[in-house]
Every structure is written in C-alpha cells, then in structure tokens.
Amino acid sequence: MIRITLVGSVVCAIVLASTGVIAKEDTPVSVVSLPDHTWCLSNAFISRTLSVSDGRLRTVVIGNRLTGMTAKPGDCNEFELRISQGTHTTGTDRVLTAASFRFVRQSEFALPGGVPGRGLSFLLENDECGLSVEVHYELRQEDFYLRKHLVIVARRELTLERINVESLALTGGHQPYTVRAINARGKWSPGLGQPLHGIRTATFWGVEFPASVNVVQDGVLRCGYLWGRQPRMGSPYRTYSSVVGVAGDPAFVTEAFYDYIDRVRIRPFRLQVQYNTWFDTGRGVTRDSLRKSIKLIHRKLVAERGNSPLSAYVIDDGWQDTGADWTDKTWKVNGKFDADFASSLRAVREADSSLGLWLSPGCLFGASRMVARYRAAGFEALDDWMSLAGPRYMQLLEDRMVELTRMGTRYFKLDGLFGHLNLRNFELRGDRYGIPYMPQLGLEGVQAGDKRLNAAAYDELKIYYLTAGTERLMKIFGRMAEADSEVYIVISNGAYLSAWWLQYVDAVWMINAGDAAGGSSRTEELVYRDERYHEIWQREHTQYPMHAIFNHEPKKRSTGEPKEVFRKYLYMNLSRGTGFIELYIKPAVLGDYDWDVISEGLHWVDHVFPTFKRSRMHGGNPKKGEVYGYTAWTESRGYISLHNPAGTAARYRIVLDKAFGLGPDTGPFALSSPMADSLIGLGERYDYGDTIELELKPREIRVLNFDTTMPDWSILKALQIRTEDPPPPKPVELVPVTDHAILGIWDYAHGGKPYSREFTSEGVCVLRQGKNEIWRKPFAVRNAASARVAGRFDHVIKESGVLRIESRYTARRRSK
C-alpha cells in the first residue's frame, strides 16, 4: 500500500510498504528539456529520458530515484507494430519500429481531469505505410510508475497483428513467469498478463491488459498484446498503456508491483464472506430453501455468536430456466424464483446482506443445453459453448448482466468463461464475425476443443480469441460497475491469472484446481489445495496477489467431526489470506459445535484481515510432506500459520525479516494465539530480525498471532468452550473379507514419498507413509474389483492390475 502524508502545502512523503523506502516530493512532476532534442520526464520516484537527436525516438535512460540506479537501454526499438494485410494471409507481415517513422513534433501536456502531473508526446509519421503514431508518456505526481501508450491512425487498410508498446534491450531484464500452456485439454496456464522485472534497476514492466503478452527474449524486453484487427481508417486507435514502476530494492519488485495493483484496482480490497447454495442444495435450490438457509445462518452466526452479517447469499447453478427461449433475453429465471428475485432480495436484506448469483458466460454446466439452441438461431456458438467474442450473444449477455446488477444483485460468480478445469474452446473461424482467423494453419476437421490445439503452433490464433473475449468481458464489467459501484465480481472456471483483471473484477479462480479438495482426511484436503498454491506462487512464480484468489473453500457439509480437527482445518484454510471467503456449508445438518468453530474462524479473520494485502506462502512443498504455511503483516500486526503434513516430526526455522514480509523497524510484537497449544516452546515477545525455531509434530497445525498490542481473544475462547464435542461415532462393525483381489499391500508414491495401503481379511484398510502408520479405517467390498473405505473413498482395481485410489493415486500390489 502507498501511504501519503502531506507536509506543509507542497511537500508529501510517500512510503512504499513493500520496501520501506521513503521518497519526499518537494516539487511537481518536471519535464526538463536537455541538449540534442532530449527531454526528461520525472517525479520523486522515477524518470524517463527520451531523445530524437537523430530523428529517431528512443528511450536513453530509465531512472529509479528510490535506489539511485539507472539503466541505459541498448538496442531500443521503443515500440513495435507488426502489420499485415490480414491474419489470414501469409508473407504480408512486417514489423515497424520507431526507426521506421520520421519525427514530426514533440509536445508537453497537462494530464486529464486536472490530475497533478505532466505528459510528453511525440508525433511520428510513416508515409510508405500511411501510418501516424503519437507516443504518449504520462507521469502523475504521486505515482511510482509511469505510463505510455500509442495513438495510431491508419490512412489505408491494414491489420495490426501485434502491438508492442515497449521494446528495448534492458540489462537484467527478467521474465518471472515462463509457463505457456494455452491448452484446449489438460493444464491451463496461458501466461498472459504477467509482468516483467528489471533486476538491476528494481523495476516492473507490462501492459495494463489481462491478455497482454509480456516477454523477455534474447535480452529484449517486449510488452504488448496480439490484436489482429483493422483499425478504422482515419480514426485514432488508442493502445492499452504500458507501465514501468520502481521498487526500493531489487529483491522486492513483486511487492512493489502489488502496491501498484492496489492503486489501480477497480474497487478497494475488501473482505467478502458469503454463503453459496451449491454444496447445500445443488440444482435443487428454491426461493424457500434459500430463505431457510439465510435465516438459519444469520441466526447461528450473527444473532447468537456476534459475527458480522455475511456480505452475500449466493444462488448457484439452478435458478436459470433452460426450458425458455433465450434468444431475446439470456439467463431467464425459472419458476423456483421470482422473475425479479423480489422475495430473495427481501430475505437477504432482512439479514443485512446482499444477493449473489452464479452465471456461466459461456453457457457451461447447467446452461450447456442452450448452446445448440443458440447455434440453431444463428448466434455465435463454438463446439461446446458460446463464443465470448460473438457480437450477438455477448450483447445479450451484457444487457442481462447489467439488468441483474441494476435489479440488486451485488455479487456474481462467473463460472465457465473460456472453458472449465479440463477443457477449453477457441474460435478457429473468426471470419464469421470479424475476429482474427488463420486458415493457413490447416484447421480442416479441427474442433474448438481439439487436443491437437495444445500444440504451440496454434498459440497465436488462440491468443487472438482470448484477447477478443477478454476485451468483450472488460466492457461488460465496466458497465456493471457503472450500474453499481459496489458490485463484487469473481471470474471462475476458464479464467486465467493476471493481476490486471483486478482493474475490472475482484477475485479470480486459482486455476488447475477442482472445486472439491479430495482426500480421506482434513490433512489430505489441505495438502491438495495448498500444493496448488505452491505450484502457482512458489514454483511458477505467478505475479498475482494471493489475497484476491477464489479457492473453493472452506467446506463443511456434515456434522460429527471433532471440533479440534475442524478448527485446525478452518484456521489453516483461512490463513491463506484471501479476502474472498465463500462458505460451502450445509446449514441444516450442522450442530451447534460446528457453528461455534465457524464463528470462531470468522472472528479471527476479522482481526487479521488488515494484513491480507500482503499474504504469502512460506516453507516447502505440501505434496512432499514438507512444512509450509502462510503469513501476512502490517506495521502493527501479523500472523504465521504452519502445517506439517508428514507422518513424522519436523523442525522449522523462521527469520522475522523483510524477506518474510515484515517491514523494517516494526515491532516489538506480543505473541498470542487463539489456540493455546500453538504457543508451546515459544517466547512471549518477538522483534524484527528475531528467529523462531520450533518442532512440529506429525500433521500438526499451529497459528501464531503477532500484535503490538495484545489482542483480546475472549470471544474466541468462549466459543471454544460453548459446546461439548460431538459424541464419538459408534464403532463400525467390521465385516471380514475373504478371497478378494484387493486383499494385500498396495504401494504408491505421493509427493516423492512412499505410501502403502494394506487391506486385511478383518475388513481394515491401513494407510502408512513408509513404516509410519497414519490411520486405520474399515472397508467394505462393493464388487469383484472394488472396495469403499470408511463409506466414502473408492478403490478400484483396473484391468491392468493397478489399484486406483480415490481417483487420485495409482498403486501396485507389493510382491510377496
């Protein structure tokens, strides 16, 4: 976060929380004219020096005034335009750079709206191609980042295939995120909208567009996007802006980038706690079932236990009328609800809350039957779902979503954009309605979700569609915000992780993770989801704030679980630090002891939420059984969660320093925890720079709170003793098993460690990690090739002789 304090009438001190550096601004943004047709645009944080000394526009120096470091780009194209006679043609493309244009004039201008700051522009002409480009650089007084955009006017027909707003050779240019998996089937990691770093200059770079393509190749930093369309002749086309920002330390560029994102997001970061009907009533949801759930949740959490009212109650899949004609209005309401949701809106308002709706922009899941009908009516359908770039369909969608927003819906879960967890569709024949197409790729017989499209040869065509769909969604989100500035939007299945989405929405699906964290224990559920976190942020280095993620948890659909087991799962879940908490609960079956734990967890979140802007993961890989956890800090508050998922004890060491998320000169902190056993072996106070060493028992979870003023946990402590634990389950009568193929020991690996499951003739399944026993559970034979453990977890022997465990692991019989 950037904090601004005015000193006197003109001096302001700005603290970058990510770096602890203070920059004092004594003067406004300056534009200094230097010799040899050179100008410098600067403020207290950043400077950019531009020259046309030889008739060619180029950047000659980038200055980081927080560190005093400068960079002089080597080969500087300044920008690149790849033009052609159409994406469907071959051999007509060429790349124009600043050197392809003649300099006409330079201008200085004030920023729109009276915003303190200045801008520089350079008009360039290319007579051969009939193109003019005006390059704009803008810097606000209080910003630690500088923007640049192009205004392009074409005087003849041409296609702008790719626009690189930035192109310069930068020593130390680094691309943190390098995965490119734009797959129709399988893993979904497109790598779009990820920023670049300047290691030596402590800078971040990128184009402010979710589908931007920002890369470092052979030392050249390019920030741009694939567009593939014709600008209207004679009319100016304004590109998306690029941004270059500075950090106070090369080691903390990501944190500075998150500070910048916090400045440009569409709505301030806020805590959104809500209930969703999907894991309660599924598609059987009705106005009456929703009303009953609202009343029960509000009574149990707000009236009886003092929690804040929920932000929203969300109707998931099941409210749409798929028997109706959707060609005049899409997403009509079925008879289970009022056409305008009037009674549901009354119910949520009585609970001091808001109404939320699930909806699938691409008509996936419960709306999939509508695709064939739309196709028959001439709307733009792909093979499986609707095109998010189709003009007719997307206008219907826009009109309906804006209407629903105006009617009072304040939360939208948009599930199924470009596809879902395992399958995506791409537009291969965009010539039908004016988006890029590339028949030269040999697409005859290739379907929109064809596995062959996974090949990199099709990436450019796929990105053209993602660009067009993203732009269309951005327009819809903008209109929704105009209708209600407080609307909360989540894009779920089929979205992709780019921090620039937060200029339009509030949270994004965590990608490559199912909605149900499978496993035979709470430990395994946590490990499943937390391993996805580890892959996204620790291994792939995704530059996306963890606090704005949608992770499909926490879940509580049954009762009878020991309070301590549920409590530690819930705390670990909440400690991930997302500001979007959707409760997947089945209210009618929960006992008072379950409500006590849920209430306790939400009270804890209220206390630590101010730290969530800087939530991060620490430690090792959960899947490998390594200790890990989450942490987040402000100047006066912080927390650390720790989980040892292994079957053996482990030692762990933490240094409370800037690398761990603390600001310099913070503390001292009083150590506390709502869970008393978390404090075993630890001191009472800790300061910046201190080291914490502790030993974690097998599968132990700890939560540590650090505050400059000791917090009052009395409400949480009272909830812990408010009710007794549920009665232990009745012993399961074991059914002996004889003569079944599953009997014996089956070995498999998980997280690089050996596991086994032994099925005994007494009807017991024993899980071991190496030689350490983890649990014993009863099993029952289902048929000649399968058994079910603990009434929930299926184990199936395949024809090949392997054992599929819970549809997650593959085991082989141990040789005798």
Image (cartoon, rainbow, N blue to C red):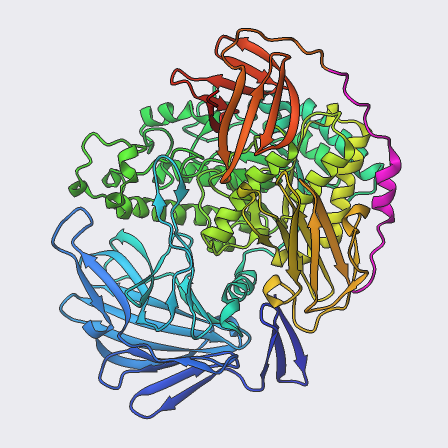
Q: Looking at the rendering, in which quadrant would you find the N terminus?
A: bottom right
Residue 27, x across and y down, in percent:
55, 86
The quarter of the displayed image where residue 205 is located: bottom left
Classify residue 788 as left or right of residue 291. left
Residue toward you, 536 or 759: 759
Residue 262, x across and y down, in percent:
56, 61
**83 shown above or below 319:** below
Furthest residue to the bottom? 35
Furthest residue to the left? 91
Classify residue 590 as left or right of residue 106. right
Residue beneath the point at 32% across and 93% down: 35
Residue beneath the point at 61% across and 40% down: 646
Looking at the image, can residue 518 be seen?
A: yes
Region rendered in magenta? 708-731
Residue 599, x across and y down, in percent:
78, 40
Residue toward you, 319 or 110: 319
Looking at the image, can residue 350 be seen?
A: no
**354 shown above or below 254:** above
Any magenta on residue 800? no
- Give the main secondary structure, helix, strand or loop, of the magenta stretch: loop
Classify residue 440 as left or right of residue 111. left
Question: How many discs mark residues in the rendered view?
Answer: 0
Residue toward you, 798 or 240: 798
Residue 246, x across and y down, in percent:
49, 72
Furthest residue to the front? 816
Classify residue 1 as left or right of residue 114. right
Residue beneath the point at 47% across and 37% down: 493
Any magenta on residue 718? yes
